[in-house]
Amino acid sequence: MKINSASQDINNVITPTSNDISKFLGIVLFTSIVKMPNVRMYWNESVGLDIIRNTMSVNNFEKIRSNFHFNNNHNQVTDPQANGFDKLHKLRPVLDELGECFLSVPMEEYLSVDEQICASKARHRLKQYMSLKSHKWGYKLFVLCGVSGLAYKVEIYTGIENVASKRENCEPNIGASGNVVIRLCREVPRNCNHKIFFDTCFTSLPLVAYFASQGILSLGTARRNRIKNCELPSEDEMKQKPRGTIVEYVAHHGGIDIVNVLRKDNKCVTLLSTFVGSEPMLSVKRYDRKKNNITSSVSRYYFPVQPSYGWCRPVSIVVRYKIVLRSKKWRVSATKCLNRNKTMNLADFKMEVATVLCMTGKQTLGKRGRPSELNQQFAEKKKKVPATHIPPSDIRLDQMQHLPEWNDKRQRCKITGCSRYFFVAFGKCGVHLCFNKNKNCFKKFHTV
């Protein structure tokens, strides 16, 4: 990534370092957790955040913010009819790098493809309106994710993806919605028992048959008008039958056996699949409106479709803790909350990433400048010293600026199991650690 827009503007030249960019991103992540009426209030002495004030001045932050983008303006193709025209030119390096990182994770057996709206109030030609979404205005994303909620591939809708130049030679043209699924599933391993789920927006007979020919199993809810010569009962006929009624047919399309199932639930649901039908049945609990209670129902429909519920997780991650910095320029962000061996909640994950980015390089947590007389008097009156915060492992193990500093008050060593007290605190971690000829807790804390 290169931050080079400023160097192309002779009236506003800045030279940020990689540490400056890391700190800038850390501050941006903090603003998604703690909400303020405007950006400058994060530096306010009364209500602002100390870690933000000690990381970067507000003027430097706004200067980087006004020049922050990721591609060379001189290489941009502005003619829509010319080869190489890209509406996402300014974000393309970031999207490509993120795509490589996502695909480096082995794919799960159950995968799902769906569309998502990334809410935004920005004025941009790519912003879409989707009346059925909770946030109706924003940028439309097509995402391939697993049952755990991890996204493997993301495509931002620009309106020019469904062209012949975007399709590979072996890929059929089955319409705009079907082509989206094919593009997202190019990297899915063939003949490895992977199962892909999608909804009525994408499902069609040619799409299901294509995946079967590629060694990929699929299932999706379908619209009846996309099924040629459909012999299933009409919805009027199904309304006369009891809830839980299932009608099943097996059809042949392009030499592929495709199961077509119609089930009456709250509404009539039609499915197309190449790996599962109505058998075997499973017992599930469903709410009955007429009886106003929960009853047991026999169904096979809910088991195969359940993995697609993992799709709700990346949606909720984008919706919660949104970055609300207003800008005339378009910005998109996403994250995944995993912490080593256990899962973290999204807020804790963002807080840890933001802290690591803000403390990059020589940054310390202490306040800059000499302490005021009022603060000194207040410190003398305090009887109890609060527990020292242990920094994230990325800061603890970065081996930068962890220099010893003398403290007039002893504190207990922060190594688990060590009960000794010591006068020396080390560097930007700010924790007290034992260091003598018999014991070296400093080395253990910063290397393990």
Image (spheres, rainbow, N blue to C red):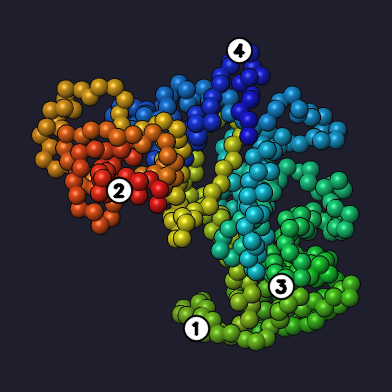
For this rendering, which residue is in front, 99 or 154? 99
Which label sits on residue 11? 4
- Structural distance between the alpha carbons of marks 4 and 2: 52 Å
- Structural distance between the alpha carbons of marks 4 and 1: 70 Å
Residue 300, visible in the rendered structure: yes
Disc 1: which residue: 295
Q: Mark 3 or 1 closer to N-term? A: 3
For this rendering, which residue is in front, 135 or 432? 432
Query: Dot 4 surroundings within 10 Å: few (below 14), some, or many (20 or more)?
Result: few
> Closer to the observer: label 2 or label 1?
2
Measured as percent of width and height from the top left, residue 198 is found at 69, 64
> What's under tag 3, amino acid-wise?
Asn
| Circle 1: element type | strand
Q: Mark 4 or 3 closer to N-term? A: 4
> What's under tag 1, amino acid-wise?
Thr
Query: Dot 1 surroundings within 10 Å: few (below 14), some, or many (20 or more)?
Result: few
Disc 3: which residue: 193
| Circle 4: element type | loop
Q: Is residue 234 above or below residue 56?
A: below
> Closer to the observer: label 4 or label 1?
4
Query: Dot 2 surroundings within 10 Å: few (below 14), some, or many (20 or more)?
Result: some
Q: Is residue 271 above or below residue 49?
A: below
Measured as percent of width and height from the top left, residue 404 is found at 30, 35
- Structural distance between the alpha carbons of marks 4 and 3: 58 Å
Quick check: 164 left or right of 133?
Answer: right
Disc 2: which residue: 441
Measured as percent of width and height from the top left, residue 99 is found at 66, 48
Q: Mark 2 or 1 closer to N-term? A: 1
For image coordinates 12% across by 37% down, the residue present is: 382
- Structural distance between the alpha carbons of marks 2 and 1: 61 Å
